[in-house]
Amino acid sequence: MTTTTAPAPGRPTAVEPGGIEAIPIEKRHGSPWQLFATWTAPNLEFATIFVGFLAVGVFGLDFPSALAALILGNALGAATQGILSTWGPREGLAQLVLSRTAFGLRGNAVPAALNTVMAGLGWFAVNSVSGAFALATLTGMPAWLGLVIIVVLEVALAFVGHDLVQFFERYASFVLGAIFVIACVAIFANPSAGAPIKGNGFSLAGFTLTASAAFGYAAGWNPYASDYSRYLPKAVSRKKVGLAAGLGNFVSCSLLMAAGAASASIAAPKGASPTDAFVYSMPVVVADLTLVAIAIGAIAANALNIYSGSMSFLAAGVRIPFRLRRAIIAIGFGIAGFVIALITILSNSTSAYENFLLVIAYWIAPWLGVVLTDRLLRRGTAIAEFVPDAAKYRNAAGLTSFLLALAVSILLFSNQVLYTGLVARVASIGDLTPLVGFLLAGSLYLALFRVIRPKLGGPVDAEPEVVVGVDAADTVA
């Protein structure tokens, strides 16, 4: 059975064949601290800035309250990013494959499908639009042409695969980091930045909405976490892996969201696109550099979104008997995402983006509650026998807990334009859906695990070096 799925180290331009097979020991490479760049670069984009803008411009917080809520949400999302990243090196498996122990092979198709849609289509469209607007403002080209350029570059990176994506993120983090530090200095140096806005101040509703939106953004990377740590050597320091991934996520998100919150009080021309409004008060050179960075940041984020969206698609159990199946799927998602972005490119709906951020947190939070609880209950045990397709492993506790927590948390605590939950309507508490979903899912899974008693593996030390049979088509040469 073929298990070789990675290009040799040092060949980032070689197309990564295969799909979601476990990475064999001889193909492992890299340093845990490369994850700092991996999770810094994709957050250095306009979507991150806009979360901070929402806190002040839409949720009505003053700057200090907004900053506190943003840091809280980012810290929670970054902490779980670090924890999940430590899981990759042990079995060399992608995140939504590891999720099979908590949901079973068939049940795992639900979170895998959700992540496929959110990552490969939803986030892809959001980020591509912001990158296209940046190019349009910078060059004067039509926004649709900017979109074509952005999408082609994004898909090219994801098509080649893991090593090229990591290579790009590493160097993009240096370039984007330098430019956005300058941009943030320009924003904070503006006399109007962070100034009090009439009617704004602390409110519980605004605080929870902001924290939930920030968590939704930072934790939006959680279902991808081990996708980018699975190539690391098995004996790598788990502490370094967790710190690198978590800090990369937290520092980049917090810096740009703070700048976004401060920029909300700076006046911009009426009808300006979100990207135009952000750079409006900057010196011309800084504004142009920032627009370049926004475009590159969109590419950095969407290279991960398409790559991991493809991985999630395969993790759902889809059988595609082609050697380059992951790469082919990446092209498909790029085309679909381009169509969605093109349809919405003239729409600058703030409420639509706000709702998208919260919806992401709605499903990721209960998924986290289930997988983290499952991992805790399985500590010290092997999982190799449960994740292959042929195992046909079932675990009704995972999907039951996930769906119940998702339904209850949304029905009672959701605070959306289209629907407001019963508790959220009665009490002005903003949006506690992610918190309730996480705690309820974890508690339900803990109880059902003890009732259903899904199988546990033997000692982790007895686990094979390479888990075989994970991909539905991994016998294809």
Image: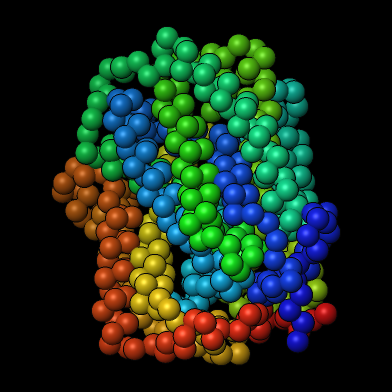
Quadrant of the image occupied by residue 354: top left
Quadrant of the image occupied by residue 205: top left
Q: Position of residue 154 (x, y in %)?
A: 72, 47
Q: Is residue 192 left or right of residue 445?
A: right
Q: Is residue 244 left or right of residue 3?
A: left
Q: Residue at x 45, y 22 (%)?
A: 263
Quadrant of the image occupied by residue 374: bottom left
Q: Residue at x 56, y 22 (%)?
A: 183
Q: Is residue 73 left or right of residue 284?
A: left
Quadrant, the N terminus? bottom right
Q: Position of residue 431 (x, y in %)?
A: 29, 48
In this orientation, does residue 198 appear?
yes
Q: Residue at x 52, y 73 (%)?
A: 98
Q: Position of residue 208 (x, y in %)?
A: 28, 43
Q: Relative to residue 413, is residue 5 depicted above or below? A: below
Q: Residue at x 58, y 21 (%)?
A: 182
Q: What coloring was used for the rendering? A: rainbow
Q: Relative to residue 414, is residue 447 depicted above or below? A: below
In this orientation, does residue 118 appear?
no
Quadrant, the C terminus? bottom right
Q: Position of residue 4 (x, y in %)?
A: 76, 75
Q: Relative to residue 389, is residue 102 depicted above or below? A: above
The count of marks equals 0
The residue closer to the viewer here, 304 or 138, is: 304
